[in-house]
Amino acid sequence: MAIAHNPLSVEVSLPREDVALVRVEGHLDLDTATEFQAHLANQLHHGRKHFLLDLSEVPFMDSSGMNIILRVYQEARELPGSVHVINPTAPVRRVLDLTGVSLTVPISEKVDEALALIDQGLPQVEAPDS
Amino acid sequence: MTMSRPPYEDAASPERPAPLGDAPSDGPPDDGPPPDTVSVTAADTPVAAPPPAGSGGTAGSEPSGDLSPVGRLAATVERLRREVRAAQAEAEGRALVELAKGVLVERLGCGPAAAARHLTELAEQAGVTPLELAVDVINQSAQDRLSEVTLGFLDTVAGRARAAEDAEAAVRLRTAESGALAAQDTQAVADSLLQHALGPLGAVAVAIWAAGPDGSLTLAGSAGFAPGESARWHYVPPDVATVARRGLTERTGHWVESLARTSLPSIGRHLFPDGGRVALPAGTGGRIHGVLEIVWPAPLVPQPPQVVRQMEALAELCAHTLETSRPPQASERPPGPLPDATELMDLAEGLHDPALVLVPHLDSAGGLADFRIQHVNSRFLDPAGRPRAVVNGALLLEAYPMAAGESELFQRVERVYATGEPFRARRMALTALVDEVALAATADISISRHGSCVLLIWRIEDETARLASLLQNAQRLGRIGGFEENLLTGEITWNGQMFALYGRPESSPPVPLERLAAHAHPDDAVTIGRFLRTLLHHRRPASAAFRLQRPDGVTRHMRVVAEPVLDTDDRPVALRGAYQDISSQHWTEVALAATRDQLAHTEQQAHERNRLTLQLQHAIMPPTHNTPLEVPGLQVAVRYRPAEEEQLVGGDWYDAVRLPSGLVMLCVGDVAGHGIEAATSMVVLRNALRGLAVTGAGPGQLLSWLNMVAHHLTGAVTATAVCGLYDPARGTLRWARAGHLPPVLVNGEAAVPLPLVKGLLLGAVPETRYEEGELDLATGDTLLMYTDGLIERRDRSVEESLSHLLSTARTVPPTLDQQLDRLLVHSRSDTDDDTCIVGIRVGPRTSDDGEPRDEESRAGESLHA
C-alpha cells in the first residue's frame, strides 16, 4: 500500500479585502484536514466572507476534507458569505458531486467566474418549496 | 606671565592622554637634549590680565592709603582674606610637599624624616623652594599629562631667568590637581580649577558638565558665574545645542572666539556676551564623562599649544572627578527601574560570573518588601541547581528563602540598596534549599547599587555547584545523599542527607568509601570490593547495591554510585557520588502499581465504551444472516461488518423494513465519525427514518425530513444515506440519495451503478431537496446498497473503487447471501471502516405479486425530480 504522503500546502491570497483565495496542494484527507481547517478558521477569524478554494492541485479528497468544506460553508452562510470551489480535479469533482456538495457549493473553472458569482450575490441555498 | 615649552612637546603631539596618576611604561621624557625654551610673554597672551585670585603669592595689591573707617575696614577684610588665602595656599602646598615626601619614601626606601630632609637639601641645591621641588618630584614620579606640561618649566629650574615664574605655573597645575583630588565633589573641583589653574590663564569662570548616557548635560560644578546662574543651567536636555554640548562631540573641544559671533547659548552668556569660550571633552580611558567649559571675559584668540595642553590636562582632571562622583541630579531621577535595569542587564550579560539584576519590590504601603529578580545572566548558576528560568522573575526571598537566614544575604542586598555602598565578601556561606534539604554553598559575593537596581554577583565554587546539580538531580529521584572525598587531603564532604542515611549524627566524621564494607552486611563484602576496585583501580564510574547496617541496628538497602575525578595525568584526585536508600523504592513501586491499576481501569473503560458501541450496533442491526424480513418474491440480505479496531466502530447503518403500505423500505447510511457519538446519531437517524417512512411519503421527501433531523437533532453531524421504497406488487423501486454512493444494479453479467440523482448529504444545511429515481426490477435482478467502507481507498478515485466493486458483483453466486459474503471478502477497501451492505434479489413472483417482468436492466430508466 503506497501512501506517498505529500505534506499539504495551503496558500492564501486576498483578491479582495473580504475574499480569501485558498490554493491547496496535496491530499485532503484525515491526516491533512485539520491543517486545512486551521487555515480556513484563521481566514474566518480575519473577517473574510467569501472563500475560493482552489482544489486544482488536490488529487484526492476524502470525507474529512469534504467535511471541512461543509463546515466553512456553514460558517460563511451565517455571515452571510459564500464558498466556491475552483477547478477541482476529476476525483475531487466526483466526490463533490457524489455527496451533493456541488449542489450547494458552486464550482467554477476560474477565480474570475467565482468572483463574478460573488458579485451577483448568488443565493446560497435554493429555498425548499415544500 | 611667562611660559615656556620644551621642543619635544610640539603642539601637534597627538598622544593619548594617560590617566592621571598612572605611570606610563616608557621612561621619563626628560632625557632628551636640553630644552630650548620658547617664551611667551604676558603681553603676548591674548587673554585678559589675570584676576587677583592666585595662590603662588600673586595676591592682589595692597589697598590704597585711604584710612577712612570704611577704608580701614576694607583693608582689614582684605588682609584677613589674604591671610586666609595664604593659609589655604600653604595648606595646599603642604599637601604637595607631603605627596612628594611619600614619593621619596617609596623611591629611596627611606623614612619620612629622611625624605623631608632630602627634599629640603635638594631644594637648596637647586635653588628652588621646597614646594617647587615637590612638584618636580611628583612630576617625575607621575609622568602623566600634567607632567608633560609642568616639566617644560621645571627641568630647567637651575640657572634660568624665568625659572621662578615657570615653576610657579607648574606649581599651579599641581596645586589644582591636589585640590581636585582632595575635593569631595565636582563643585570643589571647579573652585580649585578656577582659583589655581584657570584664573592665571585669564579665565573668569568655569563650568564642569557631567554627560548623561542620553546625551544630556548636568552642571556638576561651576565657579565664577553670577549667583543663580548655575541653578538656571543645572540641566541641559539631550539634543539641545549649547557650547558645552558641542564640546562633548568634538574631540579637540569646541573653541569659541567670542560668544557674540555664535548663536549658541551657554551658561553666563549675559555676563560675558562677547567673551571667549572653550568647551573641552573631559574623558579618561577613552570614555567621555563630561565637558569642561572655560569662560574668558574678552574675545579669545588662538592659544599657544602649551596652554591648550594645560587645559586638556585640566579637562582630564575633571573627568576623574566626574567618574568618581555622580552629579547630584542623578539621585533625583524618577525611580523608574526599567532604563536602569535594561542597562544593567546588558552589563550583567557581559560578566563572567553569575549575576542577578534585582529591582526593589514594594509592598502596598510603598515599603521595601523584597527584590524581584529582574534578570539572571547566561552565566547564572543556581546554588540549588535549578534551571535559570525558575529563578528568573521570582522574588529573591521566594527563590532563596534562606537568604534571610544566617547568610544575611538579603540584609546585605537591602543595605546596599539603601546606602549605595557596595558590599563585597569572599567565601560567604550561602544556604540553598534543595527539596527542603539545606545545602551549604560557598560563594564570593559582590553587591552594588546601580540607579534603582541592585547587581548581585556570586561566584560559587565550581565543585559546590557541581555537587549542587548532582544533588538536585539525585534528590528529585528520592532523598539521595551526596558525598565527595578529596583523595589528596583526605577531606570528605557529606551533605546532611548522607548522615541521615547512615543514621549518624551530623557532628560525627563521615565514613570514607574505602571503609564502606565495615558498615555493610558481611555478605555484601564481595560486591563492595568489586565496586571499589572499579572505582579506584580502573578509575571508572561504578555502582553497587548493598545492605547498610546502621549503628541503630536498622538495615537499609542502599545503592551507591560514584565516579573518580581525575587530574590531567589521569590520577584520581577525588571521588564523588551518591547513596540512595532503595528500601524506600518499595513505596515507589507501590505507587507505580497503583498508577498502573488506574491506567488499566481507564483502558477498561475505553474498552467498555467501544464494546457498548458495538453492542449498540449489534442490537440494532444483527450482523449476519437472520434476515429480518420475509417478503414473498423478494430475497433480502444484509451484512454489517464492524471495523476491526473497536474504536473505529461507528455510524454505519442499514435498514430493511416492510411498511404498513406493503412497500419495503431499504436504506443504508453512514454517519461521519466514529465511536459512541456517531453510533448514537446513527440510532437517531435510523429510527427517525423508520418513523417517517410510516407516513407513506416518497424517498425524496423522507430524506428531506431526515436532513432536518440530522441538522437539528443530532448536534451538527453530517451523514450520507440512500433510501429506497420497493413495491413488491409492481416490482418498482423509487429511491433517493443524500450524498451517498448510488445503489448498484446487478443483472446477469452486468453490474451498473444507478445514476447520481441530486441530493446533498444530511445535516449540512437546514433544508434541502432530494431528487428521486425510479426503476423496474425484473426477476433475478439484484440491487445492492452499501457504505463506502466497502470500497474506499486512499489511492483510488471513487470510480476506480466502484469499478472494482462492479466487477466483483458481476459474478452472481446462487444465493444473495453468498453474493454479499463474496463482496465483503473481495472488498479492496484499505480503510478499516464499518461496512454495511443491503441486497435484494427479485425472485419469481407469486401470483398475488402480479405478472413476472422481463429481465432487461432498467437502471436509470426514469427519474423524477
Image (cartoon, coloured by chain):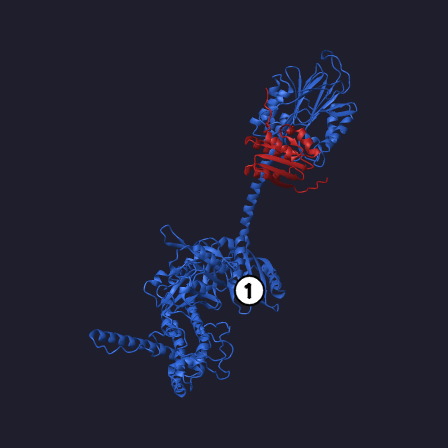
Rendered red, the chain in question is A
Query: Which residue is situated farthest in the left direction here?
Result: B69
The furthest residue to the bottom: B125
- In the rendered image, residue B647, in percent from the top left (x then y), is placed at 63, 35
Q: Nearer the viewer, residue B233 or B361?
A: B233
- Horizontal and vertical percent position of residue A51: 60, 35
Q: Which residue is mark 1?
A: B515
- Of the pair A51 and A61, the residue shown nearer to us: A51
Give the residue at the far right of this rendering. Answer: B749
The answer to which image quadrant residue B246 occupies is: bottom left
Q: Is residue B104 left or right of residue B633?
A: left
| Residue B111 is at least partly visible in this image | no
* Image x and y of residue B723, in percent: 66, 23
Residue B849, placed above or below residue A64: above
Q: Is residue B16 above or below residue B669?
A: below
Query: Would you say B26 lies left or right of B844 here?
Result: left
Amino acid bearing label 1: Arg
Q: The numbered mark 1 sits on a residue in which chain?
A: B
Q: Is residue B333 above or below residue B696?
A: below
Residue lying farthest to the top in this orientation? B848
Q: Answer whether residue A117 is visible to the viewer in this image.
A: yes
* Residue A96 sits in quarter: top right
Within the image, what quadrant is residue B58 found in?
bottom left
Image x and y of residue B648, in percent: 64, 34
- Judge whether B625 appears above or below B696 on screen: below
Left or right, B269 with respect to A109, comes to: left
Quarter of the picture holding the N terminus of chain B: bottom left
The quadrant the C terminus of chain B occupies is top right
Colour representing chain B: blue
- Who is closer to the viewer here, B459 or B757? B757
Q: Nearer the viewer, residue B132 or B527?
A: B132
